Image (cartoon, helix red, strand yellow):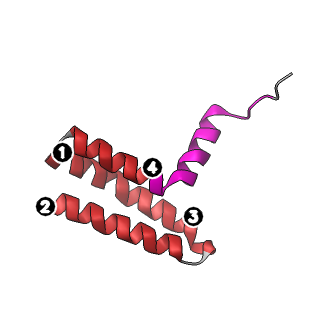
Amino acid sequence: MNLSLICACVWAILATAIAMGPRRFHWPGAWGLIVTGVPLLGWVTYHNGPIVGLICLAAGVSVLRWPVHALLSAMLGPRRAAK
């Protein structure tokens, strides 16, 4: 296991610790995880290839599902009610 994958595992452990913490730290922690996770994902992909990069991306999205949901909702706009 190389250094990029070790850092990705530490990122996942840190994400778990933030999730177990008080609720008031969730969104600031999520922003910190996003800021550190994007370059880390590029590093992992560069060193280990696109398959491992996609696996790490899927793991990151599963951890940060609510920020991703909020981003997609903001990008798609409000949904219209069915008539």
Mark 2 vs mark 1, CA separation in Å: 14 Å
| Mark nearer the viewer, 4 or 1 | 4
Q: Is residue 71 left or right of residue 13?
A: right
Give the mark nearest the N terminus, 2 or 1: 2
Residue 78: say if magenta: yes
Mark 3 vs mark 2, CA separation in Å: 31 Å
- Residue type pointed to by label 4: Val
Mark 1 vs mark 3, CA separation in Å: 28 Å
Q: Residue furthest right?
A: 83
On residue 1, the disc is: 2
In the figure, residue 82 lies in which quadrant?
top right
Q: Which residue is mark 4?
A: 61
Give the mark nearest the N terminus, 1 or 3: 3
In the figure, residue 75 lies in which quadrant?
top right
User: In the rendered structure, which segment of residues is drawn in magenta?
Assistant: 61-80
SS at mark 4 in the image: helix
Give the mark nearest the N terminus, 3 or 4: 3
Density class for disc 4 (Cα within 10 Å; few <14, some 14-19, many ≥20) is some
Q: Which residue is mark 3?
A: 27
Which SS type dominates the magenta stretch? helix
Q: Residue at x 63, y 40 (%)?
A: 74
Q: Which residue is mark 1?
A: 46
Q: Residue at x 16, y 47 (%)?
A: 48
Q: Pointer 2 and pointer 1: residues touching (CB < 8 Å)?
A: no
Mark 3 vs mark 4, CA separation in Å: 15 Å
Q: Residue at x 52, y 75 (%)?
A: 20
Question: Residue 24: horizontal and vertical position, in percent?
Answer: 62, 73
Question: Residue 46: horizontal and vertical position, in percent?
Answer: 18, 45
